[in-house]
Amino acid sequence: MTATAGSASLWRKAGRRFARNRAAMASVVVLALITLASIIVPITWHFGIEDASWESILTPPSLADGHWFGTDANGRDLFVRTLYGGRISLAIGVLTTIVALAIGVTWGAVAGFTGGRVDGLMMRFVDVLYSLPLIFFIIILVTVFGRNIFLVFVGIGAVEWLTMSRIVRGQTLSVKTREFVDAAVAIGVSRGAILARHVVPNVLGPVIVYVTLLIPTNIIVESYLSFLGLGVQEPLTSWGLLISQGAGQLEQAPWLLAFPAAFLAVTMFCFNFIGDGLRDALDPRDR
Amino acid sequence: MLSYTLRRLAIAVPTLFIIVTAAFFLMRAAPGGPFDAEADLEPEVLANIRAAYELDLPPVEQYRNFLGRAFRGDFGPSLVYKDFSVTELIAIGLPVSITLGLAAKLLALLLGGLAGIVAALRQNTLVDHTVMAVAMTGIALPAFVTAPVLALIFGLWLQWLPVAGWNDGALANLVLPVVALALPQVAVIARLMRGGMLEVLRSNFVRTARSRGLRERTIVWRHVLPSAVVPLVGYLGPALAAVMTGSLVVEVIFNLPGVGRYFVQGALNRDYPLVMGIVIIYASFILLFNLLADLVYALLDPRVRKGLES
């Protein structure tokens, strides 16, 4: 019980440290705005994401005609498409991270807590997968099953949990030797309960930090795949797909690349600042 | 050292075998065949085509034949690039990808290393903050954003350099792809280098060297740098292995005939033999580079070396 009380005040202190970090707090606000806009704007905006118009093809950004970010080669409004793309990109980033989180934490905690030969085998498996680049899995999956947004989830989920499992295993190994775990074993708490109640809460800090860094990584991966034509397909769109279309018409319509790329870059900055801020807040020794 | 090398090889070779096997059977189990698109073939014609590509044999037999030929470097004909064998396509693409990858890696090491060292020596000054801000931007902007912008500025507007194409590896054609490929790596390397330097600069043996009155330059070159590059070597191993897969986007954007572009095209066209061939080549390179990186790491870091000998 004391461990819980102690960790609660630890979290409160970390929260206070984080709140003092201006770059991180500003990033939280900006990120919240982007997220809210990408949820609300596609519903309420006066252009739909697929409203094509022959009168306004490749028109530059202008406040007067309502196309704030200009239009694309089909006369579709880029403002609403950028935010809709953001919705898909952010959703993929978060969902794939949750998949990686679930697999990675379970794998790492079980390996670290069980130890011995099981641990060795499980981590050897991680080593083998670790040596192969993500694009490998994606290309093989796409060759086999054809293009499908679902494969992006499977591919990213299959690879990005590896680092997570290593982090969790390392933390678990060190938590395992602490007295309160010995005490729990001594009073006959089951292994599953010890894992869930003592080990997992104690590895939470580094995991949270890694999650805030994994979301932007996965957003970039999705963009990269969509850019190559292996990820999100029309009529759906994402920042990567928009950037790829913009790159093809850079000379006639530079805004088609500029706006989605700017949104992507700002999102990356925000996540990185938040991740750095959380790391400093949760691990004050580092600075 | 020798036993360590052998032990690593004993892991690498079965890994390669497992990858190849898994990829082969996955592709054979795939729904739909590669000739589905060519509609309305006479059944006899289709049977002949299937026989020519050995698709009528039982999978295990296909696999045995495939392994035998692959071992001799023969990956069969491409299903899409009809006049080329997969081996020929890879032979065309490999020099392009390796040239790109190595040139970019060298540039990134040079620029990133230098930036990191300068930033660390001037810690918390304007120089340091500028370098780190630029590095952060480099990380936030992926190659598929910077590459088109570079092509627009230097290719279309200023017309200093060709917008795209390989042109037998002419230097002018190399500049933009190499820079685009190197930029994100410069950022990562600069951060690693700075971190490594700062850590070593604070250590006891550097304080001792200072107290002995050595010149700052001697301290940095003789004492700090050799220890500070160790984390960088740890990063370089996997990064070198990724030399070829890394250039994928850049090859597509600049329309370069590298392996990466064939890899993507192969996936989009579902060209099984081409993808299999490239998977085997890539996987072999990656495992080889990882092995080399581990060995170099062991040579550089006495603690790791000691651990191996005992």
Image (cartoon, helix red, strand yellow):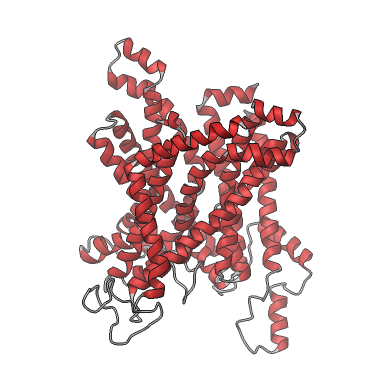
State the image quarter where residue B281 is shown.
bottom right
Along the viewing direction, whichever of A22 and A248 lies nearer the viewer: A22
Q: Position of residue A10 (x, y in %)?
A: 49, 33
Q: Position of residue A20 (x, y in %)?
A: 35, 39
Residue lying at 30% horizontally and 44% vertically, measured from the top left: B133
Q: Position of residue A130 (x, y in %)?
A: 59, 46
Tell me: residue B194, above or below residue B184: above
How many numbered marks does the figure carry? 0
Q: Position of residue A80 (x, y in %)?
A: 36, 72
Is residue B180 left or right of B298 when viewed as pictured? left
Residue lying at 57% horizontally and 61% vertically, measured from the top left: A153
Is residue A203 left or right of B219 when viewed as pictured? right
Given the current orientation, which residue lies at the most extreme top position? B212
Q: Quadrant of the C terminus of chain A?
A: top left
Answer yes or no: is residue B278 visible: no
Q: Quadrant of the N terminus of chain A?
A: top right
Tell me: residue B159, above or below residue A64: above
Along the viewing direction, whichever of B187 and A188 lies nearer the viewer: A188
Answer yes or no: is residue B216 visible: yes
Residue lying at 22% horizontally and 73% vertically, measured from the top left: A63
Is residue B267 left or right of B145 when viewed as pictured? right
State the image quarter where residue A148 is shown.
bottom right
Residue lying at 67% horizontally and 66% vertically, measured from the top left: B27
State the image quarter where residue A77 is shown.
bottom left
Tell me: residue B292, above or below residue A144: above
Along the viewing direction, whichever of A225 and B266 lies nearer the viewer: A225
